[in-house]
Amino acid sequence: MDKYIFPAVFDPCEEQPGYCITFPDLPGIVTQGDTVEESLAMAKEALELHLFGMEEDSEEIPVPSNPSQLIAPPGGFISLVEASMPIFREKMANKAVNATVTMPRWLKTLAEDRKINFSQVLQSGLKERLGVHEFAPTKSGKKI
């Protein structure tokens, strides 16, 4: 799905200013922000990351609760949070990750002496070998 909208519970934090945020339908998400604006941004990011992980693990994403049936905590509030997954998937696909490679010591030393950027060479080589220029969906059609 391209877009999800889930209700979030914004509960005033006890020991610091701001809000602790949870999602009743997604118990694995807990985040916080110091202001309303920061809390809303953190809720969106946490929701997108959690849903992305569920998609990657082929987990079923639950139907969101009706926000009118939720009760806000004292001093807190309920807000709908939208996750735009195409934008987030693209962000995650282009996120830099570490890869461990193995090579002979002499080759590594020579490349370092010549100030070769290992990441750039590996990326260029993989793109050439795979026949791609930029980000492409996986064979299954699922974006990386």
Image (tube, rainbow, N blue to C red):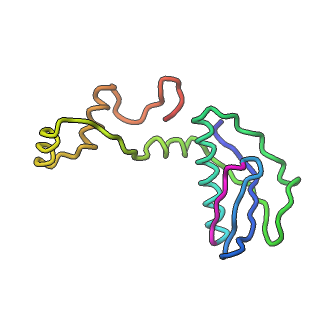
91 vs 17: above or below: above
Looking at the figure, which quarter contains the N terminus? Answer: top right
At which x and y percent is residue 138? 47, 28
* Residue occupying the point 54% across, 30% down: 142
Q: Is residue 108 left or right of residue 49?
A: left
- In which image quadrant can residue 30 be found? bottom right
21 vs 13: above or below: above
* Residue occupying the point 70% across, 34% down: 60
Report if residue 87 lies within the magenta region. Answer: no
* Residue occupying the point 33% across, 25% down: 131
Q: Is residue 87 left or right of residue 26?
A: left
At which x and y percent is residue 54? 63, 39
* Of 50 and 77, the residue lying toward us: 50
Q: Which region shows up in magenta?
A: 27-34
- Residue found farthest to the top: 139
69 vs 53: above or below: below
- Residue found farthest to the right: 69
At which x and y percent is residue 12? 74, 71
* Residue occupying the point 62% across, 32% down: 58
At which x and y percent is residue 96? 39, 46
- Residue found farthest to the front: 105
Q: How many marks?
A: 0
* Of 138 and 82, the residue lying toward us: 138
143 vs 45: above or below: above
* Of 116 and 27, the residue lying toward us: 27
